[in-house]
Amino acid sequence: DAGVTQSPTHLIKTRGQQVTLRCSPKSGHDTVSWYQQALGQGPQFIFQYYEEEERQRGNFPDRFSGHQFPNYSSELNVNALLLGDSALYLCASSQTGQGVTGYTFGSGTRLTVV
Amino acid sequence: AQSVTQPDIHITVSEGASLELRCNYSYGATPYLFWYVQSPGQGLQLLLKYFSGDTLVQGIKGFEAEFKRSQSSFNLRKPSVHWSDAAEYFCAVGNNQGGKLIFGQGTELSVKP
């Protein structure tokens, strides 16, 4: 049973560019949450998607946007990249009704902005 | 405000020694509490979780944690640390409504031979 899959594992972007990160949830899961983990910090909640809609959002600017597809996979898009966007981006999937109790995390995408 | 505090940024223990990692939380609703472990460059692995019931919970890899409502604490313990336990440990709090977890800053554990 595959867990949460994130791609790519690493990428380097230049300031001002745009980036798309991808997440495939664990089999049977229909909710996807995204977190940003800066170096030396704990993960911070970006937003959560369910039924192809953003259900909850953390304190992140509109440059951060997302999408969920009918197969429950999700994308995180970041526009106008800043150096401060360099971080590990984690995706977590869960099943409706489980909430945080059923989270499974992926291994993350390491984004470096130069 | 909702928050999680892990007072110890870095802890070093000798292999075979006992371990306690501290976690304090501030949360308005009934808290769901978690401990995760993260190895370098990896995602988060759930060690244990507490929702209700017995305040002493057992997790994987020989870890346990005790919920103390009066102290707003959820400290993680292990009686005998192994070199493979060296990693970053995160305490987190949430509820079962919003699906959002609030994490502490993490405690880095080093294990001396």
Image (cartoon, rainbow, N blue to C red):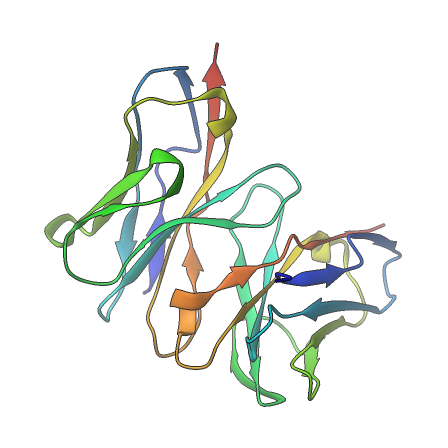
Please give the name of the residue rendered at 47% of the width and 19% of the height, measured from the top-left corner.
Answer: B111
Eyeballing the image, is A6 above or below B88?
Answer: below
Count of marks placed on residues? 0
Q: Position of residue B17 (x, y in %)?
A: 32, 16
Quarter of the figure that contains the N terminus of chain B: bottom left
Give the quarter of the image for residue A6: bottom right
Name the residue nearer the viewer: B33 or A2.
A2
> Which residue is outermost to the top?
B113
Location of residue B16 with respect to A81 vertically, above or below = above
- The correct choice, above or below, for B10 with respect to B44 in the image is above
Residue A77 appears at what percent x and percent y? 75, 73
Q: Residue at x 25, y 62 (%)?
A: B51
> Residue B95: where, in percent of width, then height?
32, 70
Q: Quadrant of residue A34?
A: bottom right
Residue toward you, B57 or B99 = B57
Classify A23 as above or below A15.
below
In the image, A56 versus A26, the foreground residue is: A26
Using residue A26 as the reference point, say whether residue B101 is left or right of it.
left
Residue name at image x 26 percent, y 64 percent: B31
Could you tell me which residue is drawn at 35 percent across and 79 percent down? B97
